[in-house]
Image: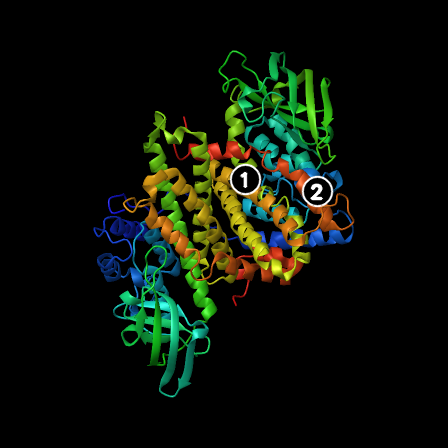
Amino acid sequence: MAATKPGDGLSSLRLRSVQLPQEAKDARAEVRAFLQDALAAGVFTPRVDAWLRGFSPEFSAELGRRGWIGMTWPTEYGGRERSALERFVVLEELLIAGAPVAAHWIADRQSGPQILRHGTAEARQAILPAIARGACFVSLGMSEPGSGSDLASVRTTATPVEGGWRVDGSKIWTSHAHRSHYITTLCRTGADRPKHQGLSTLIVDLTAPGVDVRPVRLIDGESHFNEVFFTDVFVPRSMLLGEENAGWALVTSELSLERSGPERILSTYPLLAALVERAPVSAAAPLGELVAELWVLRRLSLSIAAAIDDGDDPVAEAAMVKDLGTAFEQKVIDVSRRVTGDEPSPHDSDPFRAMLAESILAAPGFMLRGGTTEILRTVVARTLVDTR
Amino acid sequence: MSERQLLLQTAAEIMATRTEDETSWGPALWDTLAGLGFDGLGVAEELGGAGGTLADAVGVVGVAAANGVAVPLAESLLAAHVLAAAGVPMREGGATVAVAADQLECIVGADGVRVRGRLVRVPWARHLASVVVVADVAPGPLLIELGSCRVEPHENLAGEARDDVIVDVTAARSVWQDPWTEERLRRAGAALRVAQIAGALGRMRDLTVEHVTQREQFGRAIAGFQVVQHQLAILASIAAAAGLAAEYVGDAANDDVAVAATKAYVGRVCGDAARIAHELHGAIGFTEEHPLHLLTRRVWAWRDEFGGDTHWAAQLGTRALAMGAEAWDMVAAEPDDRPTR
């Protein structure tokens, strides 16, 4: 390689190692003590994929009381102005415990920060303090029956009317829309504009007249998914996020947050925790492989949280976390089967066999939600080569 | 630019502008690097070192790997650090390291340590003047002159010397202030191999990007094909994860969990990256004239040196089983939260 230019082999990597500050360690101790008490009191039963499946308004309200929702936001909106690293630690402790955090998860991770940055003063006042209290839940209105990976092809329309818009169309795969308060809805506001330039995101009140929510049952019998229909739904002007017709930039700007969090790695951690308690000594190596992979991927996620907090937007690295992380979540299932030989048994009183069953039936969603693995790889490749 | 970045860039420039074509041993480059003190990074100047930190040393080792150079940098640095811990200055002519294992007999006497037996797969032994042996049966590191031993040549997949050394000498007692254990040497060696593999993977990604951008088939650059893009994305993801792992071991080369986790993970996935790099390069990348093998052959060798991925995974797994419900602590705790064993 004498003739090539000097390389350090790390040129495209913007991520750095992160040392957790003392406040984050204190936050860990605090949330751990709370979770131990809650478990002992039977407040919840640990389950896998609980950030999507464990819906408990009571538990969310309790977390809100303790300042663990919207914890990085300004105090004037109910936040606690704590650091992104403290938040990361709180999230991971909740996730590994399999605690029911689904009710507020999307609002805390995505909708809240979006409203904080791009919402009107009215929307911020009306919604953010309620989210931080654990009393307001938000669904994501992105996909439609005809628009999945090709999200910019959405056809739900928002037509300007006096004081706002009238929304018509439908959204699908909207988790928990039947028990949430709002749905952030990607709509076509500029019908005559090019595909990516005529979109806007509106915050739609799920109790407004003309909104109809119908459940979609999944292969495990759960129905957190819904299809949401909008017929002549009025949305006031104050519920616009960002600029009109600039919705695409808004959607893509939140992808790093959406894809890089610890929930993309830890969905099956409760199963791994149960596996550690029952795996035979002969399984040390495959078990250790999982521990090793988790050690590295967790730090990848942590480094991205730190980078986002510094104002970077590591879109490709976030896509990598989700790709690697969801493959890891799947691997936990595979190793659990292999080293125990246990039969998965839905609703079994044995938590390992029950979680194994639940994990297998939930797993198809891991690599779909938040951008399919194929889309993620295209996103990564685009930063490296001309993909046209 | 930070001092570290300046150092790494200087090292990269020296390595990239080398003129020798030797792929398995580069004596002229090694003389240059050693002459500039790169083999003594992180070692105090009064012991013949170049100052700086251990993280600097780990960084430079990664740069060397990215440039596919054939020099005993990692091993010399290790030897210098083991000696420095015992208060012994760096050696003329360079030193390598060996973990004694059970094929070595050490008898501690009044005038020194009688050492007899075989040291297995000692890196670069034939090219260096001495070997620092860490044996748990000895009260400190043993400094053995290789000129007084028989060196039996072997090599790794990259053609780098991994010689057996047949020893029958009396080694001088060193000061033995802070003796390293076999486990500590294996761990430090594994940390350096993680940094090396990460460096090589980063360059593998860069070479592959270059190739798929330039290579045309069916009338277009093959980078335009989605199957190629997706393979490239997997390679880049592995390289990124390994790069970050190397950042962590640079700061925590003596942390047992950090090193075990990174060596187990990086050692396991680097083969996937090498496979993809070769696949995307096509037949040209499989030839001796193309530089890709300077990276891939080393990665295939390094993943099994200083403990393969299964060795380290089993160590982590055994510990996880013992910790039970507390196993998460192993994943999340910071190196300084835990006493090092």
Q: Secondary structure at mark 1?
A: helix
Describe residue B165's horizontal placement relative to residue A349 as left or right.
Answer: left
Instruction: Chain letter for mark 2, please.
Output: A
* Amino acid found under the numbered disc labelled 1: Lys
Q: In this figure, which residue is indicated by the disc labeled 1?
A: A322
| Coordinates of residue A387 in the picture (x, y in percent) | 41, 29
Whether residue B122 is situated above or below residue A41 in the rendered picture: below
| Coordinates of residue B243 in the picture (x, y in percent) | 43, 48
Q: In this figure, which residue is indicated by the disc labeled 2?
A: A358
Badge 1: residue crowd in 10 Å (few <14, some 14–19, many ≥20): many
* Amino acid found under the numbered disc labelled 2: Glu
Residue drawn at x 55%, y 32% as measured from the top left: A371
What whole-number distance in Å separates the C-alpha atoms at marks 2 and 1? 21 Å
| Coordinates of residue B97 in the picture (x, y in percent) | 37, 68
Q: How many marks?
A: 2
Q: Secondary structure at mark 2?
A: helix
Residue drawn at x 32%, y 59% as measured from the top left: B160
Badge 2: residue crowd in 10 Å (few <14, some 14–19, many ≥20): many
Which quadrant is the C terminus of chain A positioned in? top left
Whether residue A233 is situated above or below residue A262 in the rendered picture: above
- The quarter holding residue B227 reads top left
Instruction: Chain letter for mark 1, please.
Output: A
